[in-house]
Image (tube, rainbow, N blue to C red):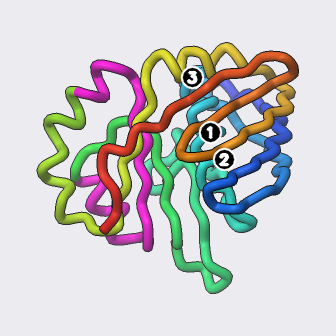
Amino acid sequence: MAQNATIYKVELAVSDMDRHYYETHKLTVAKHPSETDERLMVRIIAFALNAHENLEMTKGISTEDEPDIWQKSLSGELDVWVALGLPSEKVMRQSCSKAGKVIIYPYGGRMADVWWDKIKTSTTRFENLDVVSFSEQDTAELAKLASRAMKLQVNIQDGEVMVSVGDTIVYVTPRPWKRAA
C-alpha cells in the first residue's frame, strides 16, 4: 500500500529588500513520503526567493513533467520553472524550452559540486537558466526548522537570506553558479 503525502501548513512572510517584494503566503505543502525535511525546506526557501502572487507549488517530486514550483502567466504560459536537486542535462534542456526562466537549486554538498563540475559546460547554451546552490550546512540547519505547522519569516537582502521561526534564526547564503543571460 502506498504511503500518503504528509501535509504541512506554512505561513511564509517574505520581505525581499532586493526585489522590493513584501507579502505573506499561506501555503499547503504536500511532503512526498520519499522527500526529506531538508528538501521540503529548500523548496520553501526557493519559493521565498522567487515569491510572486502567481507562484505556485506543484505536485513536485511525484510528477516528472512538472517542476517543484512554477509561475504561469494569466494566459497559461510558463513564466518561471523552479526545480530542486541535480537534474540531467536532458531535463534542463526540456525545462528551458518550456519556460521563460528556469531556476535550478542544487543542494547536497559534495554530490552537488560533482554534478555541477560534470554538467556546467553543457549549460552555457541555456540563456534562460539560473543555477543557485545551497551549502550542505545551510540546508541541514533549515531541515531542523521543519514542522507540520510553520510560521516562517524570510528576509532577503543583498543576496543573503535570514529565516526565522520564533526565536530560532538560520542564515542561508545562496551561491549563484550560473546566471541567465
What residue is at 43 percent from the left and 73 percent from the top? Answer: 100
Alpha carbons under labels 3 and 2: distance apart: 15 Å
Report the amino acid beneath label 3: Glu
Give the residue at mark 1: 45
The secondary element bearing badge 3 is classed as helix
Residue at the outermost bottom position: 75
Q: What segment is highlighted magenta in the picture? A: 90-113
Report the amino acid beneath label 2: Ala
Report the amino acid beneath label 1: Ile
The secondary element bearing badge 2 is classed as helix
Q: Residues within 10 Å of mark 3 (few under 14, many from 20)?
A: many
* Residue 92: percent from left, percent from top: 30, 55
Report if the CB atoms under discs 1 and 2 are less than 8 Å apart.
Answer: yes
Q: Could you say which disc has been placed on residue 38 in the image? A: 3
Residue 153 falls left or right of residue 172: right
Q: Earlier in the sequence, mark 3 or mark 1?
A: 3
Q: Is residue 108 magenta?
A: yes
* Residue 19: percent from left, percent from top: 63, 61
